[in-house]
């Protein structure tokens, strides 16, 4: 295998070696118990969390992506999931404030558990990977640029979370396939 591929895969493996699986299970329970889940991420993190939302939809979990025209209001009993590797961006902080004021619970996925975003959350799931908050100088820990390690780790995390939710909610492959679009 090419050295760059091996290095990137090893870096992803190191992230998951440090991940607290009990915290992942807590996040799973938050999703399983929510009336409605709304997700948000900025930039490339948005692409990852949109894929997660798609799989939640396939499972029959009531879900929306913040910013879509069909996103419902959130309130008591709802869950707002925010991914923000660096710990804070202005849009995430503003939306978290709105969700919190409306009574929704907030699950915050980040590499920076001590941050303004984390302080607003009901639960913080720490994904210990390099982001743009620590991609330069002595803090740099990845061959991948900027926040790519965090973003790649999000994809893997979300896929494993789906596997855990499938088991938790007893969703069949047939039920998931039945919810897949036929407009492709």
Image (spheres, grey):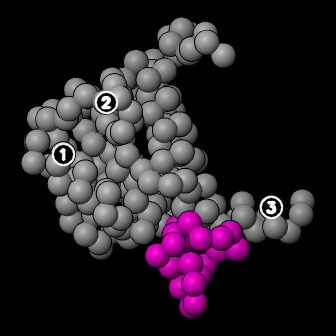
Decide if residue 32 is in sight here: no
Task: Report if residue 142 lies within the magenta region.
Answer: yes
Numbered circle sitting on residue 5: 3
Q: Which residue is mark 1?
A: 99
Residue that sits furthest to the bottom in the current view: 138
Count neighbours of disc 2 (C-alpha within 10 A) and say few if under 14, some if 14 to 19, many if 20 or more.
some
Marks 3 and 1 close (CB-CB < 8 Å): no
The residue carrying mark 2 is: 71
Residue at x-position 35% and y-position 29%: 69
* The residue stretch that appears in magenta: 129-147
Whole-number angstrom distance, CA of label 1 to CA of label 2 = 13 Å
Residue 8 occupies which quadrant of the picture?
bottom right
- Identify which residue is drawn at 89% across, 63% down: 2
Q: CA distance from mark 3 to mark 1?
A: 40 Å
Q: For the C terminus, give its image quadrant.
A: top right
CA gap, disc 2 and disc 3: 38 Å
Q: Position of residue 142 (x, y in %)?
A: 64, 74
């Amino acid at each position: 295998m090419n050295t760059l591929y091996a290095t990137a895969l090893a870096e992803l493996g190191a992230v998951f070696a440090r991940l607290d699986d009990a915290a992942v299970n807590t996040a799973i329970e938050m999703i399983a118990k929510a009336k409605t889940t709304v997700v948000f991420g900025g930039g490339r993190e948005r692409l990852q969390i949109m894929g997660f939302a798609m799989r939640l939809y396939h499972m029959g979990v009531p879900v929306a992506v913040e910013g879509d025209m069909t996103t419902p209001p959130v309130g008591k009993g709802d869950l707002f999931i925010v991914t923000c590797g660096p710990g804070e961006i202005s849009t995430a902080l503003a939306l978290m404030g709105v969700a919190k004021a409306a009574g929704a619970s907030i699950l915050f996925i980040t590499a920076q558990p001590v941050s303004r975003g984390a302080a607003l959350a009901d639960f913080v799931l720490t994904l210990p990977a390099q982001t743009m908050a620590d991609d330069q100088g002595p803090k740099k820990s990845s061959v991948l640029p900027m926040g790519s390690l965090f973003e790649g780790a999000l994809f893997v995390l979300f896929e494993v979370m789906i596997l855990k939710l499938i088991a938790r909610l007893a969703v069949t492959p047939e039920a998931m396939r039945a919810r897949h679009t036929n407009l492709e």
